[in-house]
Amino acid sequence: NMKTVELANELFKIYLRYDSEQAFTVGITTIAEAFNAESGTLFYKNAKGMFKFCLTGTGFPISLPEARWRQCIPEQLQDGQILLFRHWTPPGIDTRVDHWLAGKLQTGNAESSYMFLGRNEATWKKEDVDSFEAVSKSVAEIVSIRYKRDIEIKTRHDAEDALKLIQTRMTAFFETSHDTIYTIDNNDRFTSVNSAGIKLFGTTSRDQILGQPFSLFTTDAETHRFFKEKILGTGFID
């Protein structure tokens, strides 16, 4: 119906507006208000492998130990059916809510997500269940897209961290090596040199070497030619 379509559009706008997991808290609050529910909860696993849930009225997702997170999910929801049940207290609040409507979100991710809506005064009717099922499909699509995007971001960050670690190790090796290590460009000028090289070339700082021609630090033309041919041929001098 039109109400469900409008709600789905509003949810997509929310997930475009909020780049962080705060989108989940704003989203579940918006859904709860649309269904006249006193409470709403969204359980999910994020890209970092953390088990979380969002609760209406809170401004941020809350982490739970995996065992506690799974205890909150009724076994009947594992089949992907819409579940109606009574008298449940979501984690993080002290007040029990009488009438609950819950469903498993078919996100296609390795770990499923679950959405709960709770009322005290009015029970859930068939039209509520139908609307909930329709909205769940939209939420599942949004959660899936956000999850895949976050996985891509995490993978990129992990790769960047790995490269930084390699760079740190290589820098440490370069600086602490007792052997002379240096690089020169196509114009035969120094582009880098380690501490051992500074001592070998009889200087006191890199500034005295970097940018200078290699020939400046060799005793004769034959030595210079030999070193240059070795570096051009193999990339190093043993």
Image: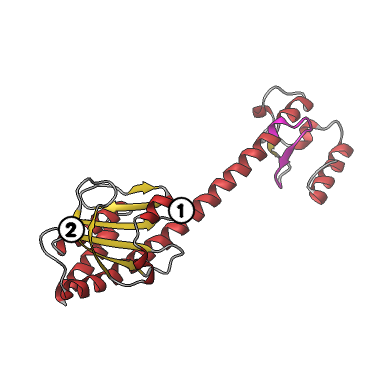
Q: Which mark is residue 108?
A: none
Amino acid type, mark 1: Gly
Q: Which residues are magenta?
A: 174-186
Instruction: Describe residue 50's horizontal placement relative to residue 17 as left or right.
Output: right
Q: Which residue is mark 2?
A: 98
Q: Residues within 10 Å of mark 2 (few under 14, many from 20)?
A: some
Amino acid type, mark 2: Asp
Asked whether the beta carbons under mark 2 and mark 1 sit within 8 Å of each other, the answer is no
| Residue 173 position (above or below residue 24) | above
Q: Residue at x 71, y 47 (%)?
A: 186
Q: Nearer the viewer, residue 41 or 152?
A: 41
Q: Residue 189: percent from the left, percent from the top?
A: 71, 39
Task: Look at discs 2 and 1 and give the one toward the viewer.
Answer: 2
Q: Which mark is residue 49?
A: 1
Q: Residue at x 89, y 39 (%)?
A: 222
Under tag 1, what secondary structure?
Answer: loop
Q: What is the quadrant of residue 169 in the picture?
A: top right
Under tag 2, what secondary structure?
Answer: strand
Distance of mark 2 from mark 1, alpha carbons? 32 Å
Q: In this view, which residue lies farthest toward the left?
A: 121
Instruction: Describe residue 145's horizontal placement relative to residue 190 as left or right.
Output: left
| Residue 173 position (above or below residue 60) | above
Q: Residue 64: percent from the left, percent from the top?
A: 38, 48
Q: Is residue 181 magenta?
A: yes
Q: Residue at x 43, y 51 (%)?
A: 66
| Residue 94 position (above or below residue 132) | above
Q: Residue at x 76, y 25 (%)?
A: 199
